Amino acid sequence: MFYDDYDYLPALFTAVADPSEVKRTVDGWRIERVGPIQGAADHCTIHDPLGWEGMNVRMRPGGTPVYLVSREDAPAVPVAALVHPTETLPVRMDDCGDGLATPSGLVVLHADPSTTRIEPAARMLERTWATLHARAAEGSGWLLENFRESLRDASVDPSDWPVDPIEGDFANDWLMIPDEAGTGTVLGILVSPDGCNTTACLDADGKTVATLLTFDH
């Protein structure tokens, strides 16, 4: 893994070091702080609710912020997300990461203690379904068909779900909504069904203080 492939890291770490601005542009990269992820669990779960892989990172007291990275000239397509569960600043990325399967094209982050994959993201799945119907009408039908197949594989029946999206949903390929309990939050990001990568970000002492998700669009 070479840093030349992650030109946004200096801009991202600059934004994390000064979180006073929700949105900022640094060296051609748009960094937006969203969240925080909140919930009853002591960890934040990152997974495709219709997939088979996932990971947990610890929660920051009061909620875990997430920083979305996109190109300044393409702000509607996030290329990465940094989950920052500590107060300590990351200064570099680890040399190796891991893949994360996202067969449905949706990755969610939440702090719901439920041990089921689908329940914490039930409303997010419905909102995604409606958004992909709208995009199919604009010519991106393969995303809807892929999502439909993932629902079928997970034995989820969307036949009574609405197909008209709420205005603004996934406007920049992400959506934050209340969790199923109504006390926390769930972040959903539309990504490639080919999967994501997760890599630890380290502080000056080499300790893991954040997790970087990278998206292949």
Image: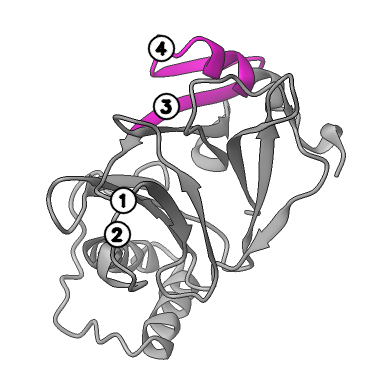
Q: Are marks 3 and 1 in contact (CB under 8 Å)?
A: no
Amino acid on which disc 2 is placed: Pro
Q: Image height check: is 7 above or below 153?
A: above
Residue drawn at 44 percent across, 81 percent down: 150
Crowd band around label 4 with a 10 angstrom C-alpha radius: few (<14), some (14–19), many (20+): few
Q: Which residue is mark 2?
A: 113
Q: Are marks 4 and 3 in contact (CB under 8 Å)?
A: yes
The CA span between labels 2 and 4 is: 31 Å
At which x and y percent is residue 196?
62, 57
Q: Is residue 134 left or right of residue 48?
A: left
The CA span between labels 3 and 1 is: 21 Å
Amino acid on which disc 4 is placed: Glu
Q: Which residue is mark 1?
A: 41
At which x and y percent is residue 168?
25, 43
Q: Residue 12: tell me if it is visible.
A: yes
Of the two numbered discs 3 and 2 on the same chain, state the one appearing first in sequence. 3
At which x and y percent is residue 213?
60, 46
Residue 26 within the segment the image draws in magenta: yes
Q: Which residue is mark 4?
A: 21
Q: Which residue is mark 3?
A: 33
Count every numbered label the image shows and give the total. Answer: 4
Amino acid on which disc 1 is placed: Ala
Q: Are marks 2 and 1 in contact (CB under 8 Å)?
A: yes
The magenta segment:
12-35
Of the two numbered discs 4 and 3 on the same chain, state the one appearing first in sequence. 4
Instruction: Provide the secondary structure element on which disc 3 rests.
Output: strand
Q: Residue 28: tell me if it is visible.
A: no
Residue drawn at 20 percent across, 70 percent down: 163
Q: Point out the frontmost of discs 2 and 4.
A: 2
Of the two numbered discs 4 and 1 on the same chain, state the one appearing first in sequence. 4
Q: Point out the frontmost of discs 3 and 1.
A: 1
